[in-house]
Image (cartoon, grey):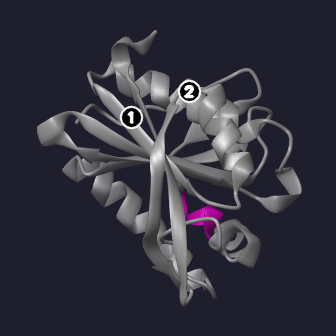
């Protein structure tokens, strides 16, 4: 796994999640509107969950399991979301995931952050990027399309989330897709 890398875009700074981010993580990831669009964020989401997540992201990076970035505004703003990749090294495949604080929805930050992370992944030899969104979260599908991933199918009743079966729209992209 390469050394941790901070990424910057025109409007964003992607950096390691830090202990000082715990309150913002609890607030934003703890928002039910965010948790319902993700597979793994628990609800309710406590500050202890946030502190554990910060510790785990460092371990995952070190162990080569995943790379997670806190999304902040480039002008030094506070955390507004997270973006990351979970790796399957054997197949040089990475799964993309992200979330943005509801107050920041509609500004293109998810697209900008995801595009930077996918470029980083391809630049570090990952051949395939996969991602998905639950049916009903079409905004996430538009993000995936804008960053060049292609819709590959619908996985019916793929996940049981908050007691409800959720269908997943699957996307993928290859390094040589252009």
> In the image, which disc is placed on residue 70?
none
Q: Is 121 left, or right, of 167 in this rendering?
A: left
Camera-side residue: 33 or 83? 33
Could one spot residue 13 in this view of the protein? no
Q: Is residue 171 above or below residue 117?
A: below
Could one spot residue 177 in this view of the protein? yes
Picture coordinates of residue 178, whole percent (x, y): 46, 9
Q: Which residue is mark 1?
A: 129
Picture coordinates of residue 175, whole percent (x, y): 36, 18
Q: Secondary structure at mark 1?
A: strand
Camera-side residue: 75 or 85? 85
Q: Which residue is mark 2?
A: 116
Give, as a single range, the part of the protein colored magenta.
18-22
Does residue 114 belong to the magenta stretch?
Answer: no
Picture coordinates of residue 150, whole percent (x, y): 51, 30
Q: Secondary structure at mark 2?
A: helix
Q: How many marks?
A: 2
């Amino acid at each position: 796994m390469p050394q941790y890398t901070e990424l910057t875009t025109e409007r964003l700074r992607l950096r390691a999640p830090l202990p000082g981010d715990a309150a913002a993580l609890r607030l934003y990831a703890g928002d039910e509107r965010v948790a319902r669009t993700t597979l793994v964020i628990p609800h309710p989401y406590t500050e202890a969950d946030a502190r554990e997540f910060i510790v785990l992201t460092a371990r995952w990076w070190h162990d080569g399991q995943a790379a997670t970035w806190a999304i902040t505004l480039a002008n030094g703003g506070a955390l507004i979301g997270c973006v990351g990749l979970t790796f399957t090294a054997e197949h040089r495949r990475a799964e993309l995931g992200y979330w943005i604080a509801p107050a920041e929805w509609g500004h293109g930050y998810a697209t900008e952050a995801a595009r930077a992370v996918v470029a980083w992944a391809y630049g570090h030899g990952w051949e395939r990027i996969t991602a998905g969104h639950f049916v009903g979260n079409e905004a996430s599908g538009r993000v995936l399309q804008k960053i060049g991933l292609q819709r590959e199918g619908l996985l019916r009743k793929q996940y049981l989330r908050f007691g409800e079966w959720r269908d997943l729209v699957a996307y993928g992209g290859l390094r040589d897709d252009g």
